[in-house]
Image (cartoon, rainbow, N blue to C red):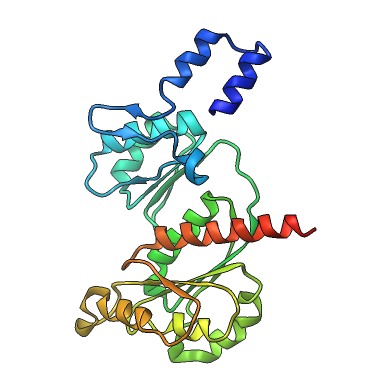
Amino acid sequence: MQIKELLEAVKNRTISVEEAMEQLKDLPYAELPYAKVDHHRQLRTGFPEVVFGLGKTPEQIAEIFAALFGKHRKALATRATQEQFAAVRAQVPQAEYDAVSRTISAMEQPWEGIGRVAVCCGGTADLPVAEEAVVTARMCGAAVERFYDIGVSGIHRLLTALPEIRKAHAVVAVAGMEGALASVLAGQIDKPVIAVPTSVGYGANFGGVSSLLTMLNSCAAGIGVVNIDNGFGGGYLAAQINRLAQEGKGEHE
């Protein structure tokens, strides 16, 4: 329950002042022995804090995840392992694990996403990063459509998908190797393209640096680039753009 809802509940006498104070003490953040869980982030940004799984023990990620879910009734963890998921599931039975995207998610009341985000990837090897973007955008409230294996080496596959991709409010372009997918997409559509370079490629790919540099040096306008393998960042940004597009649409109806 957020501050506005707490005040309304006290006013309507559905909870006591003492109960409201008990909830308020954790609203800025909940202090754990190894983490300060930011419960105000949804008020500031529109979505709760997300747990980054790498480097955390199963016990740590489970306690942080449970704290977020207990307050917001939804939670997301990225770069998570099966072992971490088992620990989370013991505290949050609603939690689900996606092995491709390596995400743990839980939502008490799933809703149908709004607007439209397109997640595109060059090849099957890019799927883990693309799926991380999909899960993130959906958890942020966006309706998402996938367009996979449409890399530029078989550009007819991309051209066939363009009419549907153009319907999206934001497009996430996930690609490794030389990373040309984002440039080609941006030259064909009138929507923002969020380029996500992946570490997929042979030796001279330098772990995704070649894709990153291609995307940063693109001659096509309308591209923003996130870090290598950062599907979470791409999906989150696409969901924010999608939300703004929906709000603008509502204002003009």
Instruction: Give residue 10's quadrant in the image.
Output: top right
Q: Position of residue 221 (x, y in %)?
A: 49, 82
Q: Position of residue 144 (x, y in %)?
A: 58, 61
Which quadrant holds the C terminus? bottom right
Q: Position of residue 127 (x, y in %)?
A: 41, 68
Residue at the farthest right position: 253
Q: Position of residue 20 (x, y in %)?
A: 52, 15
Q: Is residue 1 visible?
A: no
Camera-side residue: 241 or 153? 241
Which quadrant holds the N terminus? top right
Who's the residue at 48% across and 14% down the image? 21
Camera-side residue: 201 or 39? 39
Who's the residue at 31% across and 38% down the image? 61
Count of numbered marks? 0
Who's the residue at 51% across and 38% down the image? 43
Against 236, residue 47 (above or below) is: above
Q: Is residue 41 visible?
A: yes
Instruction: Give residue 251's quadrant in the image.
Output: bottom right
Against 76, residue 24 (above or below) is: above
Who's the residue at 47% across and 57% down the image? 236
Q: Is residue 64 left or right of residue 47?
A: left
